[in-house]
């Protein structure tokens, strides 16, 4: 394997994981970010985000001299052979991805890129972005490649180092092959295609997963009405290899930094080319309905109006193992409970204190038993395994009303019932 000099622009979830894991494969990597304080901490091997295994990998590669950090894209690209763009592409007001950060980076580095280097779009971007970046660059001696990421928060490092596939797209074959060669040590199946198809793969994958989750949440509601157990239903269909076991767990809705913006972005792109996509619209609508349904389940379990009811929310992050609150369905449901007049106290192992602008109106504490004090109901909103191991007898003594709504089906219902809790799950 050739050792490449790589620049990674953006040191967020995707950029930091990408740069660190490429360094662990033996490449020389420089990560750039506009946040000087973050760069200073990363240079000392200090990682702010909660991502298992990442901090140790950063520290080890910094110590080995394979990974370094600089402020600003310009400082990173001057001798780079490959430049990864890992900047935010948030959802704009129309639902389309906002490419302002990508455009700003291209403007900053356009004249600094060495001849023959390859620019790689790693961020999730609309179909056609690689061609747009090439036009912005205006450099015949710099190729543009699409290399979408498929990292799940909470398992980003193993996802990178043990990928299901590597997707690389470019209209310049040599550039696609150079990027694919960066991952040669991983031995993963590699899809070499054109840039537009590679960009489409990312949206197609995430939107399919969102559809699968909306489907199973609808199945859970139908199972409740018909007296079936959705856990047995999903086990039964999951053994079918055409369906698989993953993404078949009902919950309070899907969220996070990818699925909400990617589904809306693909829907927006579809409108632009005058393509009606009712299945994708229904996927999004079902997800919105699921959050409201969780509030209805809590109100029914409490047995009285939520106004003035004290509710303990167990979990705020969008999934266990992270501290990420972006588009969190748990936080969305907590917000709806608050808006219904409930007095909300929350505990999450990844969120030890309130986060201004996100948890406003919610009291966040660092102890689950304190959160449960005098509560009319405990509501599990994130699937932290720690919740299953709580002392439920102690919680039974702490609450005002022994009611639990488990929107993730993670608890042992028999244990809770033995100490007097009335338990409501999903699809059961």
Image (cartoon, rainbow, N blue to C red):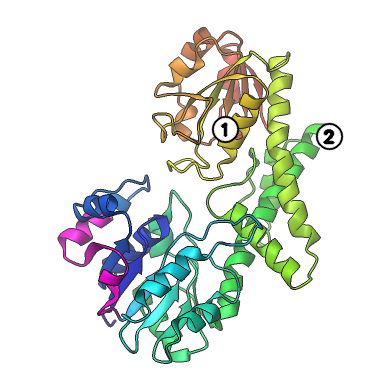
Q: Residue at x 20, y 57 (%)?
A: 60
Quadrant (top left, top right, bottom left, bottom right) of the C terminus: top right
Is the residue 73 above or below the residue 113 in the image? above
What range of the chain is rendered magenta? 57-80
Compare residues 29 and 380 and report the one nearer the observer: 29
Residue 396 position in % (x across, y down):
53, 11
Closer-to-camera residue (424/311): 311
Q: Residue at x 34, y 74 (%)?
A: 185
Quarter of the image where one finds residue 195: bottom right
Is residue 69 a member of the stretch shown in magenta? yes
Residue that carries the numbered disc 1 in the rendered image: 381
Nearer to us in this view, 147 or 363 = 363
Q: In the visual, does 44 lie left or right of 142?
A: left
Q: Is residue 122 visible?
A: no
* Quadrant showing the N terminus: bottom left
Q: How many marks?
A: 2
Assign a secondary structure to mark 1: loop
Q: Residue furthest right?
A: 226
Which residue appears at 21% of the width and 56% of the height? 43
Mark 1, residues whose alpha carbon is within 10 Å: few (<14), some, or many (≥20)? many
Mark 2 lies on residue:
226
User: The residue tagged with tag 2: helix, strand or loop?
Assistant: helix
132, above or below 386, in the image: below
- Residue 20 image-quadrant placement: bottom left
- Can residue 424 be seen from the camera position used here? yes
């Amino acid at each position: 394997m050739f050792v490449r000099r790589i620049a990674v622009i953006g040191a967020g979830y995707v950029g930091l994981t990408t740069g660190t894991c490429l360094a662990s494969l033996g490449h020389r990597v420089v990560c750039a970010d506009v946040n000087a304080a973050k760069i200073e901490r990363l240079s000392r091997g200090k990682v702010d985000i909660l991502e298992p295994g990442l901090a140790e990998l950063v520290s080890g590669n910094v110590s080995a001299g394979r990974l370094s950090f600089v402020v600003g894209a310009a400082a990173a690209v001057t001798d780079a052979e490959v430049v990864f763009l890992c900047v935010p592409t948030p959802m704009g007001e129309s639902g389309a991805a906002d490419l302002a950060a990508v455009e700003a980076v291209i403007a900053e580095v356009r004249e600094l890129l060495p001849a023959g280097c390859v620019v790689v779009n790693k961020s999730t971007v609309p179909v056609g972005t690689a061609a747009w970046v090439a036009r912005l660059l205006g450099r015949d001696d710099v190729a543009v490649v699409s290399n979408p990421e498929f990292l799940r928060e909470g398992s980003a490092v193993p996802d990178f180092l043990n990928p299901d596939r590597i997707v690389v797209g470019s209209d310049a074959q040599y550039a696609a092959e150079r990027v694919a060669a960066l991952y040669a040590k991983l031995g993963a199946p590699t899809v070499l295609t054109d840039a537009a198809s590679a960009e489409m793969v990312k949206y197609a994958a995430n939107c399919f997963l969102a559809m699968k989750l909306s489907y199973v949440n609808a199945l859970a509601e139908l199972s409740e009405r018909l007296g079936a157990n959705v856990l047995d239903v999903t086990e039964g269909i999951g053994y079918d290899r055409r369906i698989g076991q993953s993404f078949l767990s009902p919950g309070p809705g899907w969220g996070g930094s990818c699925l909400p913006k990617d589904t809306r972005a693909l829907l927006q792109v579809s409108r632009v080319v005058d393509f009606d996509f009712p299945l994708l619209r229904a996927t999004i609508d079902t997800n919105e309905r699921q959050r409201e349904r969780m509030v209805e389940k809590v109100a029914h379990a409490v047995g009285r109006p939520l106004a003035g009811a004290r509710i303990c929310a167990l979990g705020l992050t969008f999934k266990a193992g992270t501290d990420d609150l972006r588009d969190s369905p748990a936080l969305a449901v907590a917000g709806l409970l608050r808006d219904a007049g409930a007095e909300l106290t929350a505990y999450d192992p990844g969120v030890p204190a309130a986060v201004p602008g996100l948890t406003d109106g919610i009291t966040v504490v660092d102890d689950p038993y304190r959160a449960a004090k005098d509560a009319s109901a405990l509501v599990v909103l994130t699937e932290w395994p720690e919740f299953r191991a709580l002392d439920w007898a102690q919680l039974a003594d702490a609450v005002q009303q022994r009611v639990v709504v488990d929107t993730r089906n993670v608890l042992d219902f028999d244990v809770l019932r033995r100490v007097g809790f009335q338990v409501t799950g999903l699809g059961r």
